[in-house]
Image: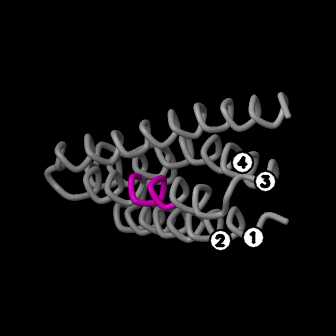
Amino acid sequence: MLIVTSIIAAVLTIIFIKLSFAVIKWRRKHKVALGNGGFDDLERAIRAQANFSEYVPLGIILIACLELNGAPWWLVSALGITLIVGRLIHAVGIQTPPPDFSKRVLGMQFTFNTLIALVVVNLGWSFYLFIQ
């Protein structure tokens, strides 16, 4: 069962929906059907949503792999929480005008460090299971 992954994926999906609604809000306000129409606020919303959708799927897949392979729930949870935190910080940083690069950088640091940790832990855990 993927109980921890299900919770993490649900929280991340809620964030994605909120980011998507922000894009819709700005598209309606500026009457832009495609692209950003030259509006910075719409561009920030589009990039926040797109950046989220570029990084989160790999994180969820690696979290699910860990949980399916029997890694401790606390380890899976900790990595999932750091992914959530990183994505939240990045989304706030990119959408706050003018863009707050310190929050964007911090959010990406959380995200990259989490993804790297997920790779290392998945490889380590798989090797541990393989040699048993």
Instruction: Find out whether residue 118 is within the magenta segment.
Output: no
Q: Residue at x 22, y 50 (%)?
A: 103
Asked if labels 2 and 3 touch by Cβ distance under 8 angstroms, the answer is no
When the figure is inspected, residue 21 is found, relative to residue 67, above or below; the finding is below
Lower position in the chain sequence, tag 3 or tag 2: 2
The magenta region covers 81-86
Neighbour tally class for label 4: few under 14, some 14-19, many 20 plus, Cα within 10 Å = many
**Residue 107 coordinates in the image, percent (x, y):** 33, 48
Which amino acid, mark 4? Leu
Between marks 3 and 1 in the image, the one whose residue lies nearer the viewer: 3
Q: First in sequence: mark 4 or mark 1?
A: 1
Residue 66, labelled with which disc? 4
User: From mark 4 to mark 2, how far is it between C-alphas?
Assistant: 14 Å
Q: Toward the viewer: 44 or 103?
A: 103
Quote the CA–CA distance across marks 4 and 3.
6 Å
* Looking at the image, residue 31 lies above or below residue 7: above
Q: Main secondary structure of the magenta part?
A: helix
User: Type of residue at label 3?
Assistant: Gly
- As drawn, the label of residue 3 is 1
Q: In screen coordinates, is 17 left or right of 93?
A: right
